[in-house]
C-alpha cells in the first residue's frame, strides 16, 4: 500500500494508472472488495470504490487520485458544476471548488517551465489567439473578450511535474501569464549599406 497522507501536492499523472490506483487501496479493503465483486477482472471497480471509501473516511487528510482525476476530466468535457456536485455527493468525485483550485495551481505551476527547461535540440513556438463574443450589443455590456496562449514543443516529451496545492488568487495567476512584447525594428539604412558593399 502506498497511501499518501498529504494534501500539499496533487496526485501526478503517474499516480493515475491501474497499478498505482489499486496500490492506493489498503490490502484489507482490497480483499473485502474483491469478495464483493464477482467479476474476474474487477481491478478498476476495486480501485474506484476503494478510493471512494478512503476519501469518504478521511476527507481532510488526503486527495484520492481517481477522485480528482474524474473531477478534472468531467469539468474539462462538460464544464458543469451541477455534474461535479452530484458526483461529489455520491462519493465519486472531488468538490467543484477543488477542481477550480487545481486548475489555478496547474496554471501557476506551468509558469515555471521556461525555454531552458525544454533542453537542447528542442524548438518552442508560442501560439496565441483571441475570441470575442456578443460584440454588437446595444449597451456594450455582456460582452466577452478572451485570449489564450500555448507553447508547442518539438520533439514532444512528457513532463510529470507535481502540482503543489496552494491557494493562488486569480490576480497572481494572471500576473504570471504576462509576456513582454518586444518589437523588432530593422534599420534599413544599415541593411542597404551592408548589401551594397563588395
Image: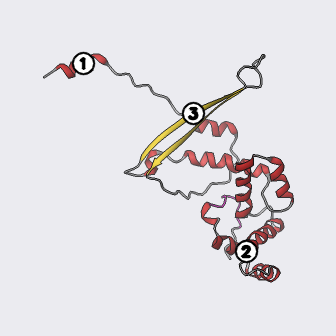
In the picture, the disc for residue 12 is none
Separation of residues labelled 2 and 1 (CA atoms) = 72 Å
**Element at label 3:** strand
Residue labelled with disc 3: 129
Residue labelled with disc 2: 25
10 Å neighbourhood of mark 2: few (<14), some, or many (≥20)? many
Residue labelled with disc 1: 192
Separation of residues labelled 1 and 3 (CA atoms) = 35 Å
Find out whether the residues at labels 3 and 2 contact each other: C-beta distance under 8 Å: no
Q: Is residue 176 magenta?
A: no
Going from N to C along the chain, the mark reached first, 1 or 3, is: 3
Q: Is residue 135 above or below residue 94?
A: above
Position of the C terminus by quadrant: top left
Going from N to C along the chain, the mark reached first, 3 or 2, is: 2
The colour scheme is secondary structure
What range of the chain is rendered magenta?
5-12
Residue 155 rendering spot, x and y as whole percentages: 43, 52
Residue 172 rendering spot, x and y as whole percentages: 65, 39
> In the image, is 90 to the left or to the right of 133?
right
Q: Please tell me which residue is depicted at 57% across the width and 33% down the height of the picture.
A: 129
Amino acid at each position: 500500500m502506498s497511501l499518501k497522507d498529504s494534501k500539499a501536492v496533487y496526485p501526478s499523472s503517474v499516480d493515475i494508472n491501474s497499478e498505482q490506483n489499486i496500490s492506493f487501496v489498503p490490502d484489507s479493503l482490497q480483499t473485502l472488495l474483491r469478495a464483493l465483486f464477482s467479476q474476474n477482472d474487477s481491478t478498476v471497480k476495486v480501485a474506484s470504490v476503494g478510493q471512494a471509501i478512503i476519501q469518504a473516511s478521511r476527507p481532510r487528510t488526503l486527495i484520492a487520485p481517481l477522485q480528482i482525476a474524474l473531477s478534472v476530466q468531467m469539468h474539462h468535457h462538460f464544464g458543469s458544476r451541477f455534474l461535479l456536485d452530484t458526483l461529489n455527493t455520491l462519493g465519486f468525485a472531488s468538490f467543484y471548488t477543488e477542481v477550480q483550485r487545481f486548475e489555478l495551481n496547474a496554471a501557476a505551476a506551468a509558469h515555471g517551465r521556461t525555454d531552458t527547461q525544454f533542453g537542447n535540440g528542442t524548438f518552442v513556438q508560442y501560439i496565441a489567439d483571441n475570441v470575442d463574443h456578443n460584440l454588437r450589443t446595444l449597451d456594450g455590456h455582456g460582452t466577452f473578450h478572451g485570449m489564450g496562449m500555448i507553447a508547442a514543443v518539438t520533439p514532444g516529451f512528457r513532463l510529470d511535474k507535481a502540482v503543489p496545492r496552494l491557494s493562488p488568487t486569480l490576480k497572481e495567476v494572471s500576473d504570471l501569464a504576462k509576456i513582454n512584447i518586444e518589437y523588432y525594428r530593422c534599420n534599413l539604412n544599415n541593411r542597404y549599406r551592408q548589401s551594397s558593399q563588395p
